[in-house]
Amino acid sequence: MKAPRVTLDQWRTLQAVVDHGGFAQAAEALHRSQSSVSYTVARMQDQLGVPLLRIDGRKAVLTEAGEVLLRRSRQLVKNASQLEDLAHHMEQGWEAEVRLVVDAAYPNARLVRALTAFMPQSRGCRVRLREEVLSGVEEVLLEGVADLAISGFSIPGYLGNEMSKVEFVAVAHPGHALHQLQRELNFQDLESQLQVVIRDSGRNQPRDVGWLGAEQRWTVGSLATAAAFVSSGLGFAWLPRHIIEREIHEGVLKILPLDKGGSRHPTFYLYSSKDKPLGPATQILIDLIQSFDTAPLDAPFPGPKQML
């Protein structure tokens, strides 16, 4: 790759001449001599081979080519400044990246609100988000490839911060055979029906959470797929209420009238890695996740003023 002939300092100088209205004003703003500013801009034009400024009376005015190049250069200078700021923050212990693994059953709306509020405070820190199911969250944390984890299980050897509960409800299509019984249902009624369960993404010790031992079981890879299957009349399943609220409201899914166990309320926990100390960006994200964890799912997303 050919090295650039024009430096960032030269682009900054040109911007100062335009923004402050002339060479003398730019020199004052940059704390440099006017001759130095004039030489820098003249040298730029020679290096680029195109005129950037023309003199209109006593004022320096951009040429057409100068307008295009200056507009592009502003983003270049801004990116360079952000890069320098990031290096400074990293020197002070600020992380370049936070790796977060989340159980797919955790309400996505709460997570999005927390990340939206985190962005203006992130100082360039990236977030690497990964979704897993059941024991998959624990495995990712134990493998050391996550800094934070949100799981519906108690992970041995870790002290997690208790978060909200997520309600799972047993549902089936209104036309399903179970609803046609038109009475309270028991365990024996479910045993003979097809149950849709979500595949545990963990490899070492996958769990069959929620499976009743039904003779017919279909295993799918995601909550969205399970909801689609059950909404079309294929079997029954326990699904997070926040994911299927619209389907219930529209009558596509109907809660099964079980005599017991029709709903479950597992508590979720927020864990942090034990392999390295928490950096300032990670701690900010933890605080925001916990703060938005208690917010109503239909609460408005934070606007620009709310995030600052």
Image: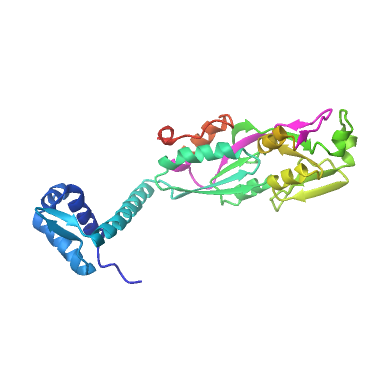
Q: Residue 233 location in percent, x, y?
A: 80, 43
Q: Residue 93 location in percent, x, y?
A: 40, 46
- Nearer the observer, 112 or 201: 112
Residue 228, picture quadrant = top right
Residue 234, picture quadrant = top right
Instruction: Check residue 233 for magenta coloring.
Output: no
Q: Horizontal placement of 211 versus 225: left or right?
A: right
Q: Quadrant of the C terminus?
A: top left
Q: Is residue 173 visible?
A: yes
Q: Horizontal placement of 263 versus 83: left or right?
A: right
Q: Residue 41 location in percent, x, y?
A: 17, 60
Q: Residue 191 location in percent, x, y?
A: 88, 40
- Nearer the observer, 205 or 163: 163
The image shows residue 300, relative to residue 78, as above or below, that is above
- Nearer the observer, 270 or 263: 263
At 28% across and 60% down in the image, what residue appears?
A: 69
- Nearer the observer, 152 or 62: 62
Colour setup of the view = rainbow
Count every numbered label the image shows and give the total: 0
Q: Horizontal placement of 2 versus 284: left or right?
A: left
The image shows residue 276, relative to residue 163, as above or below, that is below
Residue farthest to the bottom, as pictured: 2
Q: Quadrant of the N terminus?
A: bottom left
The image shows residue 46, relative to residue 75, as above or below, that is below
The residues colored magenta run 253-282
At 72% across and 38% down in the image, what residue appears?
A: 239
Residue 211, picture quadrant = top right
Instruction: Check residue 265 for magenta coloring.
Output: yes
Q: Is residue 279 visible?
A: no
